[in-house]
Image (tube, helix red, strand yellow):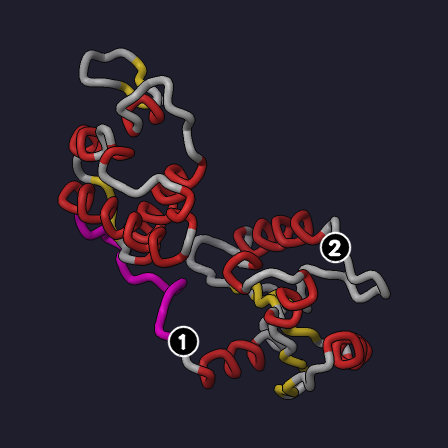
Amino acid sequence: MKVGLSGKPEKLRDIVFKKKTTNAFPSVFAILIIAFHELIIKDGEKVADYSGVKEALRNLSERIDTSRKATSPEERRKNVDTVRGLVGKCFVKADNAASQIYGNHTTIDIDSVIRRSEIELGNYELKQGMLNLSENGGVDENIMNKVVNTICAIANNGPKSVGKIIIGVTDKDKDAERIHNIDNINPKRIWKRFVVGVNREANRLGITIEQYF
């Protein structure tokens, strides 16, 4: 709920959609989440004018593509950029703008992170993937709970601590061998870890890497 200028509560969907009977397409709210996440987390900014943000989003559905093709990566990127352009003037740089979450990671950076994961156990977690390594290879039903628990554990290290969950890396020789046999790939060894990637899982599921993400 958002408080309107009249002081009465106003639903986000009533702000975003001009037609009140319009179905609230989940893709529109996903675009909002991505745009705000990029502004606040990636760019290190904060809202300076909440009323301005609300009015900038007024009838947003009329200004972005809400058709079925809007779920494609290219169209979603255009929509996210549109939202950023609309609300950007209502943001200012936050005091703690320096973000340690994003960066232009290179292969060397990733190798370094994997090596550090062996000594900084409380800050890193490795997952071989989202699928189990049984004969059927179905989705691990407990994987999301495991990831959420890991996020909470990393967060408990303190507000100035940075952690990472890396999916597509295993520290078990038997898992690396099993993945080699199932997916016909050669895991890349980095010290005591094995990089197995996630493309193999998308291929096994018969979906694109974007759908997997």
Taking the image as shown, residue 90 lies to the left or right of residue 121, namely left
Q: Farthest residue in the left direction? A: 89
> Label 2 belongs to which residue?
140
Is residue 81 something one can see in this rendering?
yes
Q: Residue shown at 78%/75% (left/top)?
A: 182
Q: Is residue 85 magenta?
A: no
Q: Which residue in the protein does label 1 denote? A: 105
Considering only order in the chain, which callout, 2 or 1, is on the residue closer to the N terminus?
1
**Residue depicted at x 31% and y 21%:** 14
Residue nearest the viewer, comparing 204 with 172: 204
Q: Which residues are magenta?
A: 91-105
Q: Is residue 163 left or right of residue 201?
A: left
Whether residue 91 is visible: no
Q: Residue at 61% across / 77% down in the picture? A: 119
In magenta segment, residue 101: yes
In the rendered image of this protein, does residue 75 appear above or below residue 24?
below
- Residue 132 at what x, y percent from top left? 77, 62
Please, is residue 4 above or below residue 208 in the view? above
x, y (%) of residue 27? 42, 41
Q: What main secondary structure does the magenta stretch of the protein show? A: loop
How much space separates mark 1 and mark 2, taking CA atoms? 29 Å
User: Would you call the spot at circle 1 few (<14 residues within 10 Å), some (14-19), or many (20 or more)?
Assistant: few
| Labelled disc at residue 18 | none
Q: Position of residue 107 (x, y in %)?
A: 46, 83
In terms of secondary structure, where does tag 2 sit? loop
Q: Is residue 158 above or below residue 120?
A: above
Give the SS element for disc 1: loop
> Residue 51 location in percent, x, y?
18, 28
